Amino acid sequence: MSHKNFPMVPRVIFGRGSFNQLNEILAPKRLNIDAPFIFLIDDVFKGNTDLTSRISLSYDDRIIFISADEEPKTSQVDKLVEDIILNTKERPSGIIGIGGGTLLDLAKAVSIMLTNDGDSKSYQGWDLVKNPAVYHVGIPTISGTGAEVSRTTVLTGPDRKLGINSDYTPFDQVILDSDLTIGVPHEQWFYTGMDCYIHCIESLSGSYLNTFSQSYGDMAFELCQEVFLDNNLSEMESREKLMMASWHGGMSIAYSQVGVAHAMSYGLAYLLGTKHGIGNCLVFDHLEEFYPEGVKLFKQMKEKHNIILPKGICANLNDNDFDVMINIALGLTPLWENALGKNWQKIITKEKLKALYQKI
Ligand code: NAD
Ligand code: ZN
């Protein structure tokens, strides 16, 4: 068996107010005055001068505001890359993604596609990227996905929802400033936070578990319990802890894998556009059979934070719709193998998956 040689983010800065150091971090990375920095920023920050006034733009540097209402698509990445190429004199010095998983994944994908030919859909998969990406920086403004540390950028393409997994995907620099997460709406805080919690449960109970993954997973799990169940944390502590939980959760799955909730959530996302955080919650709520303790705790967290999940998401779907979701979910072999072991196909059948989807 060959062991994965996993690339990590080489530089990270942590702490409240660390965003103020962005300009000094970028300055030495400027290649020349014709090679700008491109900032891809979640459009919730449009008009938020507290954030944008702290970014100093020089020469041809540009801010592009992008909506996170929908998850990133391969066609969206290709358009952005074309726009950047057509409007810059030289290849950019760097791409800086500021936002949640959506913006972080877009920044990673754009930085890869600036140096690799063709369409982004042809790089969905494992280790298909040939050339190193443009220098790229990730600055999360909401915590949970682990996209800030991961080796993937998840894109929805014409045929599938699948990541560009490569050694060139991870950020060159990450800035973890928990003050940037102050404005996150309550429900979104919960859904994206639960993505991290579910990463822990799926990693820690999977057959791929190893000491590397467990050490990060245990830490993330503990932090999630503090953030979502402890009454004694200040909001500031809670924001910092969730940011670190996200990081550790991402590190845990880097060397193991996710499981049933993620496989099924990808099906929902592909067919209905259900977003990752809430999709995971919708599915996980019905997975007692696979994760009894994890689901019990999840329900406690839901109740404590007055989260009422939408119902009847799959009520009006026809057989063909169910087939589409089931095929997407079952196509994710490593996730099932991690969750249920080598003989997973004997345990999870199409009928069983359909029955689970029908509950959502
Ligand atoms: P998101 O980026 O989709 O953002 C969710 C919502 O929160 C958006 O409406 C956004 O505008 C808002 N928001 C973000 N920061 C805010 C702030 N500070 N104040 C107010 N509003 C704010 O959410 P997410 O859950 O972080 O990311 C989901 C995406 O991440 C999915 O596309 C999923 O596929 C991807 N993902 C990637 C990885 C990876 O390893 N690459 C892992 C998990 C998920
Ligand atoms: Zn996830």
Image (cartoon, rainbow, N blue to C red):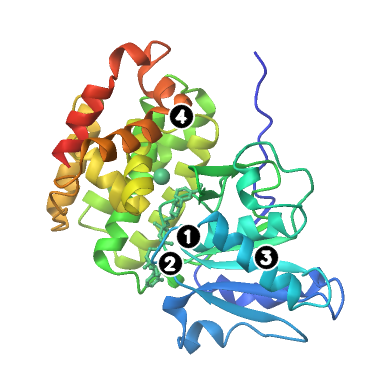
Check disc 4 and report its element: helix, strand or loop: helix
x and y percentages locating residue 63 in the rendered image: 61, 80
x and y percentages locating residue 236 in the rendered image: 36, 67
Residue at the spot of label 4: 214
Res. 102 mark: 1
**Residue drawn at point x = 45 percent, y = 30 percent:** 332
Q: In the image, is 222 to the left or to the right of 208?
A: left
Res. 81 mark: 3
**Residue drawn at point x = 53 percent, y = 73 percent:** 41
Please state which amino acid type lies under the numbered disc 3.
Val
Q: Quadrant of the C terminus?
A: top left
Residue at the spot of label 2: 68
Mark 2 closeness class: few <14, some 14–19, many ≥20 residues within 10 Å: some
Of callouts 1 and 2, the N-terminal one:
2
Check disc 3 and report its element: helix, strand or loop: helix
Q: In the image, is 234 to the left or to the right of 3?
A: left
Please state which amino acid type lies under the numbered disc 1.
Thr
